[in-house]
Image (spheres, helix red, strand yellow):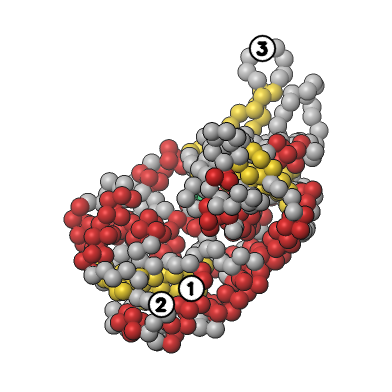
Amino acid sequence: MVAQTIPVDPFDLVILGGTGDLARRKILPGLFRRMCAGQLPPEARIIGASRSGLSTDEFREFVRKAIGEFVKDSRCESEGVERFLSLLEYEQLDIFADDGWKRLKKHLRKDVISAFYFSVGPGLFGEIARKLTKHKLTNDNSRIVVEKPFGRDLSSAEALNKELTSCFEEHQIYRIDHYLGKETVQNLMAIRFGNALFEPLWNAQHVDHVQITVAEDLGVDGRGAYYNKSGAMRDMVQNHLMQLLCLTAMEPPAKYGADAVRDEKLKIIRALEPVPPSDYVRGQYSGEGAGDSYLDHAQDPDSRTESYIAMRVNIANWRWAGTPFYLRTGKRLRARMSEIAVVFKDPPHSIFEGDFNRKGNALIIRLQPDEGITLRVTIKDPGPGGMRLTEVPLDMTFSEALGDQFAFLPDAYERLIMDVIRGNQTLFMRGDEVEAAWRWVDPIIKGWQESGKQPLPYDPSSSGPDDALMLLHRDGRRWREIKS
Ligand code: BG6
């Protein structure tokens, strides 16, 4: 059974960069799916704005194509497309000139929520914020939505926060990390705080270590210019992996509310120890000869940018002291696989004789694909031959367990945009959180820049550089296999 959807309040949503790639692939198709699910009220209005000189009809054609290309949802019927297109308006806008803003203002209603999605390069965020206030397009009930990257280091993130908060209150600023919109990422909180079973064991006394993996099989194809200035640390660790780490490690918030959750995440980021060079491994995929190589895409033959990073992270607090968190992420790896594995310690004493080569209990939360959870438990190896033990997975795949309800779930962007309209900031990053993350990341990046070291080469479709295996081997542990 598909859960009932409650429509949000009427709104005007302005998409700045309305003809850009993110709008075409994610934002507009996502809004269409929300309409099909009954979540958009008939009074919703979506206003595309960009430099392109399109008429409203041409913008609607652009959106019709985007829906054709990116929406594969059996609930969305063709008359729904017409209904959705009728909600759309368009305005040509040169961000630096005043006249477009004056015209854009005429599209906005006074008595509904207004939201402005900055779907443009971060270099334009400050100017847009200033223009919105200068031309009085916003009021106390307006929200702005900004995409990552939020700065490229602490000082640029601080400067950006300053620019935005000089025009808007923190409660009006929605900084997107789309990982927080993923169903399974939120499930992490449900699993931890909705069950009495796990929380008593969720600490250094019982957890041996945690592995957080976000592996991608795709390379940087087509995004080389952006990615080469960023690398895996800025592109993935500073935001997505950090969020996964926080949700896994944080203390239970007093309630599921925006500031309660974000306060707890912030405490974790502030408790992260510095990471010395001996505790991380950087890699760059390199298919010699005919194979795919990072350098083919980097637009810089000498690039030292990492397309892979693995690191050992310590959290200096009472709950986690002595239990390392191993993080790894990379492009062009063997498979697309994201998961969090909480590996528990062995029982304190074995009553069974012999070496059973046990791996210990583990709770594996699969974020994508094949979302679900697995609890690895030890049982008796069936049959005669004495008391031998073996491991079996207690497995649950959400798509099987939840059927249609799971198939029609909103994707990360859809959910987050609806949260913006609802005014719920729980799944968005607060300014102090982003700055704290950069404060931890900056010295690590500075360390390797000063060392001048090249990232280690790894084969495309592998698990990353061999040295990353050593990071765990030397601690007597093993990475879980990257497989589809
Ligand atoms: C983005 C990164 O934020 O996340 C990309 O910039 C990465 O490099 C992407 O591929 C991964 O997102 P997902 O949802 O496909 O896991």
Q: Residue at x 66, y 40 (%)?
A: 457
List x then y, in percent, for residue 260.
Answer: 60, 68
Kind of residue at disc 3: Pro
Circle 2 residue: 95
Left or right, 378 with reference to 65: right
Q: Is mark 2 within 8 Å of ligand 1?
A: no
Residue at disc 3, secondary structure: loop
Q: CA distance from mark 2 to mark 1?
A: 8 Å
Kind of residue at disc 1: Leu
Q: CA distance from mark 2 to mark 3?
A: 76 Å
Tell me which label, 2 or 1, sits earlier in the chain: 2
Point out which mark residue 384 bears: 3
Q: Residue at x 59, y 79 (%)?
A: 162
**Is any part of residue 118 visible from this angle?**
yes
Viewer-side residue, 40 vs 402: 40
Labels 2 & 1 near each other (Cβ < 8 A): yes
Mark 3, Cα crowd under 10 Å, few <14 / some 14-19 / many 20+, is: few
Outermost residue to the top = 385
Point out which mark residue 124 bears: 1
Mark 1, Cα crowd under 10 Å, few <14 / some 14-19 / many 20+, is: few
Given this view, does label 2 or label 3 mark the residue nearer the observer?
2
Q: Quadrant for residue 466, please give it.
A: top right
Labels 2 & 3 near each other (Cβ < 8 A): no
List x then y, in percent, for residue 59.
Answer: 26, 65
Kind of residue at disc 2: Ile
